[in-house]
């Protein structure tokens, strides 16, 4: 079976209309179908596994987002399904976030380690 790495660097794609990030959702679906898919969070997507986020109460004028994203929960469920979820340490630090703010099971990688990481996968999809 081919190993796939989804690299997510564009954050909150479609989460205003839906409750899930499309690529995190896709990774859940692929894993559920038996695919060997992991995730590397880079750029603003390093926010996803931060504990304690709450987007409830988000409104646009009189329109309320009734199904706010719960991305940390979605990422935790991926970890629970056996997916390797990696976060670029430098991207996290550049956003003022600390490793102890992340949910359990997320693996930190240094930017310099990413080229070697890519070699562990048969396919790399960058979103």
Image (cartoon, rainbow, N blue to C red):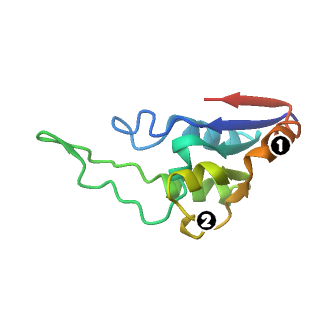
Most extreme residue toward the left, as rendered? 62
Residue 27 picture quarter: top right
Residue 57 picture quarter: bottom left
User: Would residue 67 be found to the left or right of residue 71 on screen?
Assistant: left
Question: Within 10 Å of the Cα at label 2, are there few (<14), some (14-19), or many (20+) other Cα atoms?
Answer: some
Residue at screen point 61% across, 65% down: 99
Report the disc number at residue 99. Answer: 2
Above or below, comparing residue 90 to residue 20 in the picture: below
Q: How many marks?
A: 2
Above or below, comparing residue 21 to residue 74 in the picture: above
The answer to whether the residue labelled 2 contacts the one labelled 1, judged by CB atoms less than 8 Å apart, is no
Question: Within 10 Å of the Cα at label 1, are there few (<14), some (14-19), or many (20+) other Cα atoms?
Answer: few
Q: CA distance from mark 2 to mark 1?
A: 20 Å
User: Would residue 117 be found to the left or right of residue 96 on screen?
Assistant: right
Describe the element under mark 1 as helix, strand or loop.
Answer: helix
Q: Position of residue 48 (x, y in %)?
A: 52, 51
Q: Quadrant of the C terminus?
A: top right
Describe the element under mark 2 as helix, strand or loop.
Answer: helix
User: Would residue 63 be found to the left or right of residue 9 on screen?
Assistant: left
Residue at screen point 20% across, 45% down: 59
User: Would residue 90 be found to the left or right of residue 69 on screen?
Assistant: right
Q: Quadrant of the N terminus?
A: top right
Earlier-in-chain disc, 2 versus 1: 2
Residue annotated with mark 1 = 117
Q: Position of residue 109 (x, y in %)?
A: 74, 53
Report the disc number at residue 83. Answer: none
Most extreme residue toward the bottom, as rendered? 100
Between residue 21 and residue 29, name the one nearer to us.
21
Q: Position of residue 36 (x, y in %)?
A: 79, 42
């Amino acid at each position: 079976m081919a190993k796939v790495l989804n690299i997510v660097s564009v954050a909150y794609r479609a989460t205003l209309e839906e409750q899930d990030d499309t690529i995190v959702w896709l990774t859940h679906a692929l894993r559920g179908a038996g695919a060997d898919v992991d995730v590397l969070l880079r750029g603003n997507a390093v926010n996803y596994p931060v504990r304690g986020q709450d987007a409830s109460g988000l409104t646009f004028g009189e329109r309320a987002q009734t199904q706010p994203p719960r991305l940390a929960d979605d990422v935790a469920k991926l970890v629970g399904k056996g997916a390797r979820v990696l976060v670029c340490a430098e991207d996290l630090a550049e956003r003022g976030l600390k490793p102890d703010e992340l949910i359990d099971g997320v693996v930190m990688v240094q930017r310099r380690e990413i080229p070697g990481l890519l070699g562990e996968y048969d396919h790399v999809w960058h979103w």
